[in-house]
Image (tube, rainbow, N blue to C red):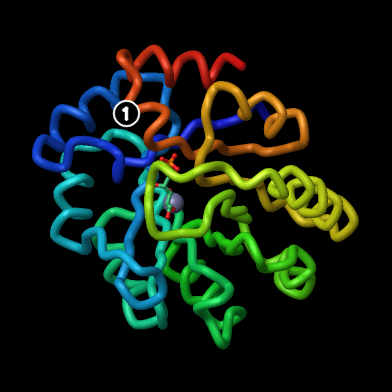
Amino acid sequence: MSHLIAPSILAGDLANLIKDIEMLNKSDADWIHVDIMDGVFVPNISFGFPVLEAINRYASKPLDVHLMIIKPDRYIRRFKEAGTSNLIVHTEACTHLHRTIQAIKQEGMQAGVALNPYTAVNNLEEIIRDIDQVLIMSVNPGFGGQKFIEHTYQKIENTRNLIDKSGSKAIIEVDGGINLSNAVRLIELGADILVAGSSVFESSNPTKTIATLKAL
Ligand code: DX5
Ligand code: ZN
């Protein structure tokens, strides 16, 4: 499969979401990445259901929802109702990850698991066959606009190896600090989905930047 691009709306103009969503609808973006932060799991608060529902009213592309919250089990159905296609939870935030993943799948969503930069890929060994997506964080979660962590390249290779040896069908998503300079190597190493926030929305022509990322 050729790689997918998921721009992160966190970096958009939150006072004019319609404009950015319409731009994404018409662009080469495959998914819209939505970052939900609770101020507990990460040291920042982004937005919650009212904003997600508003995004969903205008978006014509699947919503890839990245939960940076503790105890996500409390809200799985509500995320589905708010328009989520792919629901990603952090392994560090889930005591009973297998149960959480089953609950996400029961709601008919794609189930993803995210790993913080310090979390080893082999933590996924016992769950990799049950999930649809692995999200490798290439910055510490909580903020857009941070610098890409170089060790991510090694983690993508490790994830690719784990997927291949287990026979899992999971796809690999990378999130944080992605730009036109590091994207090629990520794709070469086996990344299937690139999330990009500031490199898209802070560029002079976001539509063109998305097209360039997609064409790499
Ligand atoms: C970080 C978020 C990322 C972020 C990406 O906590 O999970 O999705 O919005 O933004 P950039 O591309 O600016 O690092
Ligand atoms: Zn994210």
Residue 125: % across, % down: 79, 70
Q: Position of residue 68 (x, y in %)?
A: 41, 66
Relative side of 74 to 118, left or right: left
- Report the side of 214 relative to 63 (left or right): right
Residue for point 61% across, 28% down: 183
Q: Can you see residue 156?
A: yes
- Please tell me how many numbered marks the rendered image carries: 1
If the image is split into quadrants, where does the C terminus sit?
Answer: top right
185 vs 31: above or below: above
Q: Residue at x 38, y 46 (%)?
A: 144
Residue 133 showing in the rendered view:
no
Kind of residue sitting beneath label 1: Phe
The residue pinned by badge 1 equals 201
Q: What secondary structure is found at the residue carrying circle 1?
A: helix
Q: Residue at x 81, y 46 (%)?
A: 157
**Dot 1: few (<14), some (14–19), or many (≥20) neighbours within 10 Å?**
many
- Residue 131 lies in quadrant: bottom right
